Image (cartoon, rainbow, N blue to C red):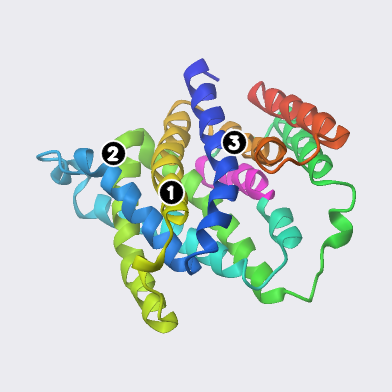
Amino acid sequence: MPGGARAALIAACVLWAVSFVATKVALDAAPPLVVVTLRLVISAVCFAPWIATPGDLGSLGGRRGLVRLFWLSLIGTGLHYGLQTVGLQYTTASNASLYAITAPITILLLSAMILGERITLRKALGVALALAGVLMVMGPGTLTTLELGAHVKGDFLVLVSIVLWGLFTVLGKAATDELGALRLTAWVTLIGALWMLPVGAYEMHATGFAVASMTLEAWMAVGFLGVGCSFLATLLYFVALERTESQKVGVYLYTIPPMTAVVAVFYLGETLSANLVVGAVLVIAGVALTERG
C-alpha cells in the first residue's frame, strides 16, 4: 500500500475514533437524526467550493452518473447514518459494537463478489487476527454480553447499516476510479445532506426540539462531526480507496476501537489495560498481514 494511502487511513480512523466522544456530547443536547442532519449539512458546506466548480455537474457521467451518485449518497450517508443512529436507541452498546466490527468482513466478501478482488489466505488471516485484537481490546466479557433476541429491532438496524457501509465502500471504489476521491465524496455528501434535511425537520417537529436550544459544547461536537468526520475523515478514506484495494482499506477500520480506547484513557481518565496493549498489537499485525496479502 502506498505510504500516502496508509497515512490517510490512519488519520481518518483517528478522527472516527474521537467521533464516539463527540457523538455522545451531541446526543446529550439534540435528537439523533437532527445530529446526523446537522453534521451532513456542515460537511456539505465544507465541500461547497469543489461542488460549485463551473462545468463540474456536466462531467459527472450524465444521467447515469447522477443516478449512481444518488444511490451512493442514499446508501453511504442517509441510510447508513440514520439506521445506525436509530438502531442504537433500541439495542445495547455491546451488541452494536460487536456488529460494527463486522464491517471489514463485509467489505472483504462484497469486494470479491462485486469487484473481483481476490480473497487470499494472507488477507483472510490478517482480518481474523485484527478481529481477535479488537475483541481483546473490548474485553473478555464482550461476547457474553451479547443479548440475542432481546434487542432484535435495534440489532437488525445496526447490522443493516454496517452492510450498507461495506456496500458503499465497494461501489464507491469503482466510482472513485472514474471521478476521483474529492469529487465523489463532495457530491455524495451534498446529496446525502439534501436527503436528511426533511428527515431532520420532521424529527424536530415531532419532538418539539429547537436548534437554538443547543449549547456551545454541543455545537462544537456537531461541528467536529461535520468537519472532522463527515468531511475530512470520509475524504481521506476515499483518497486511500482510490489508491489501493477496498479489502486492504476496510481492515483499517479495526484500528478504530483501540484508538477509541486510547482516547478514553486520556479524555475520560480510563485505565490503560493489558487487554488494550495486546489487542492493539494484534490489530496492527492483522492490518500489516492484510496489506501484504
Q: Residue 247 — which label? A: 3
Q: Is residue 275 magenta?
A: no
Which residue is painted at 47% across and 52% down in the image?
A: 217
Q: CA distance from mark 2 to mark 3?
A: 22 Å
> Which residue bears the numbered disc 1?
220
Q: Residue 110 location in percent, x, y?
A: 58, 48
In front: mark 2 or mark 1? 1
Q: Earlier in the sequence, mark 2 or mark 3?
A: 2
Tell me the magenta residue range.
101-115
In front: mark 2 or mark 3? 2
Viewer-closest of 208 and 92: 208
> Which residue bears the numbered disc 2?
183
**Residue at disc 1, secondary structure:** helix
**Residue at disc 3, secondary structure:** helix
Viewer-closest of 83 and 225: 225
The total of numbered circles placed on residues is: 3
Q: Residue 152 location in percent, x, y?
A: 71, 75
